Amino acid sequence: MEYIIGSVILIIILIITAFVLRKKQYKEVDKLEEQKLDIQHRPVLEEMTKVKQLNMNGQTEELFEKWRDSWNNIVDKQLAEVDSMLFDAEEYIDKFRFKKSRKVREDIAIELDKAEEHMNEILSELEELMGSDEKNREEIQLVEADYKDAASLIRNRRTQFGKAAEPIERKIMALEPKLDEYHNLTAEGNYLQAREIVIYLTAEINEIIMMIESAPELADDLLDELPKELNELKDACKEMDEQQYPIHHLNLEEGCLVIENNLKEAERHLIRLEFTEAEELRVNTRKEIDEAFIALEDEVNARTHLPAKIANVRKLLETLKIRNNELIREMDYVRQGYQLDQEDLDLPKEKETQLEELADTFDHQNKQLEKQLEPYSSVLKETEKIETELMQIDEEHKKYAGELEQLRSDELAARNQQEYQIKAVRDQEKIVDSANLPKIPEFWFLERKDIIRQIEALDSYLAERPMNMKAINQHTMTTEKMIETFTENTEEMIQAAEQAEKVIQYGNRYRSRHETVFIGLNEAELMFRNGDYQNALEQAAESIEKIEPGALKKIDAL
């Protein structure tokens, strides 16, 4: 019994599932039907009628017929076939033959895609044709206006274009047949072919306008200005050669020949309307001519400035040789009294060698100049280099002479400093005496003794021959630091003594009433009498602060 009930339930479920699937299949068919109707109701014919605004001849008429046949084929054949296939698909669904129906629907989708693709091709080509006509009318007006302006400009200002006038004019005139061809194609309804002509004419007229804008200046430079400048360069070379300028290193004769050939080549490019190549040659030629004139100007300037520069270097050489000899003698004298580093001992000899080498180079340059074997600019450059090195030697001489003189100054300063240091120690002794301390601590006497020994040790350094000034200066600096420390310690000792005395006197008021104060102050007084003033101060302050916190601030204010 249970088996029968289960089977019945299963059958019911299958039946329900089948009907659900069938309903879903019907919806798929409905979607395809909607797609078919969308294609069928597109206003393709209405769009095609716009073509009748154009000349219905030639290419336009052929395209119109082709589009109409294609659209009729889509509606009458492809979509009609789709109708039949939709009916089959529904019939298969009615019979629950879903697999068969799905295969038919797939074929319908393919046919509808093909139909839509063909329809889009028609609309795209139609749009292209209509757009071509509109663009052609707009752009041909600009082309014809530019064509007339260019032709008029060439006629009226022909001389400004030089040898480029005729080829540019021929290029302009070559547009006239193309313009006629455009109008003929438009009249014949061949708008797409006419579009190609318009694109060609636009590119050509733009190129012509560019040529008209750049040709006058280019022609003027290549045919007039640069040839004139080349002749000026040749004349300048000839004149300088007559004035015996050594300019053979510039190779200007060969350079002028190259420039002349480049100008001829540029002229050929200009006549052939190869403006890019002509412009490149113009730029390079201009650069070469300018560089040649700069080189010649450098030679003239060098010849003008050389005499004064040579005289200055010669005088500087003589002066530095004399000074270097004086420094050698000075160094020999100074080294008897002072120790010198090996670098200081070697420097005058090194500079003597350097001066001899520079003098030889200078003489060689002058001989080359007299024989006209070297250009003036080269000689000037080398002479300036020698001058720079001589000025460096001059600075080193001054620095070296200053260092030798400084040795004497340092010795005198050390002797004066010794006297000052002795006075500084005596001043501290007077300060301690006037402080009336009950006892001077032992550390103070030891510090003073060390400083006096340090001051007296300087005599042995000053007595050495040759003296070691580096050691003397270091010794003096060490003594200075010792005196500074000694002065600070003396001041701290006296301040501690004065403060300790104040605190002890202030604490006497508590001595009889507080045993701890009594004991603390007695210990502080003992330290004070023994010269231990800092500990005495700390002991007294600690004893009083226990009884009267903040007492030290009151004492400081007294």
Image (spheres, rainbow, N blue to C red):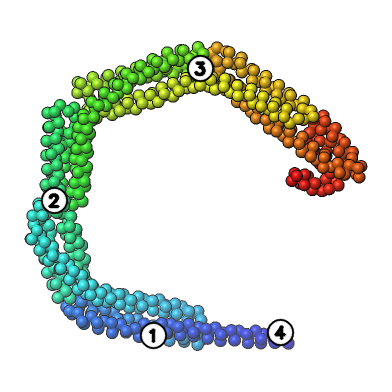
Density class for disc 2 (Cα within 10 Å; few <14, some 14-19, many ≥20) is many
Q: Separation of disc 2 and disc 4 at Cα?
A: 109 Å
Q: Residue at 50% across / 83% down in the picture? A: 25
Density class for disc 4 (Cα within 10 Å; few <14, some 14-19, many ≥20) is few
| Residue type indicated by callout 2 | Ala
Q: Residue at 55% across / 15% down in the picture? A: 467
Q: Separation of disc 1 and disc 2 at Cα?
A: 69 Å
Relative to 494, 523 lies left or right: right
Q: Secondary structure at mark 4?
A: helix
Q: Nearer the viewer, mark 3 or mark 4?
A: 3
Q: Quadrant of the N terminus?
A: bottom right
| Residue type indicated by callout 3 | Leu
Residue at the disc numbered 4: 3
Q: Secondary structure at mark 2?
A: helix
> Which disc number belongs to residue 37?
1
Q: Which is more toward the observer, 3 or 469?
A: 469
> Which disc number belongs to residue 340?
3
Where is residue 514 drawn, in percent x and y? Answer: 91, 44
Q: Separation of disc 4 and disc 1 at Cα?
A: 51 Å
Q: Which is more toward the observer, 542 or 356?
A: 542
Q: Which of marks 2 and 3 precedes in the sequence?
A: 2
> Which disc number belongs to residue 219?
2
Q: Separation of disc 3 and disc 2 at Cα?
A: 76 Å
